[in-house]
Image: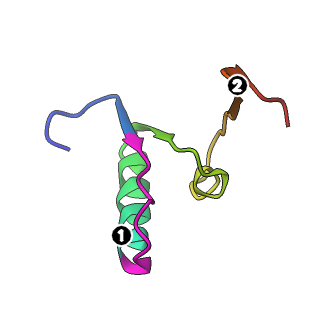
Amino acid sequence: IFVRPQVLVCIKPFSSVDFQMRQITINLLKEVLKSGISVIIITNQIAEAYTMEGKNITFHNGAIAMD
């Protein structure tokens, strides 16, 4: 991350079926989080949403879904 953003937005970062690439992506995102940069993951797969630690917000039909 060259310009030190405050937020990193990832769209479907875990869509690869390759396990090693998935682990590399998770490790990179954890390093970004350690450096103080917020990460927003946008996905339509609920299992992907809970891959990372932190707050999760789920939307259903355009509204926040209460769990």
Q: Is the residue 58 above or below the residue 54 in the image?
A: above
Amino acid tagged 1: Ile
Q: Whole-percent x and y of residue 64?
A: 73, 24
Amino acid tagged 2: Asn
For residue 62, side relative to residue 44 (left or right)? right
Secondary structure found at label 1: helix
Q: Which mark is residue 52?
A: none
Of 51 and 17, which appears nearest the observer?
17
Task: Name the residue located 36 percent from the left edge and 49 percent from the top edge.
Answer: 32
Secondary structure found at label 2: loop
Magenta-drawn stretch contains 51: no
Of 6 and 11, which appears nearest the observer?
11
Q: Whole-percent x and y of residue 46?
A: 66, 51
Task: Name the residue located 66 percent from the left edge and 39 percent from the top edge.
Answer: 56
Magenta-drawn stretch contains 18: yes
Q: Whole-percent x and y of residue 25?
A: 37, 62
Magenta highlight: main SS = loop
Q: Which residues are the magenta region?
A: 10-20
Q: Is the residue 6 above or below the residue 54 in the image?
A: above
Of 26 and 47, which appears nearest the observer?
47
Q: Is the residue 6 above or below the residue 23 in the image?
A: above
- Residue, disc 1: 24
Q: Which mark is residue 61?
A: 2
Q: CA distance from mark 2 to mark 1?
A: 32 Å
- 2 or 1: tag closer to the N-terminus: 1
Q: Quadrant of residue 62?
A: top right
For residue 34, side relative to residue 45 (left or right)? left
For residue 45, side relative to residue 31 (left or right)? right
Name the residue at the left extreme. Answer: 2
Total marks placed: 2
How busy is the neighbourhood of tag 2: few (under 14 within 10 Å), some, or many (20 plus)?
Answer: few
Query: In front: mark 2 or mark 1?
Result: 2
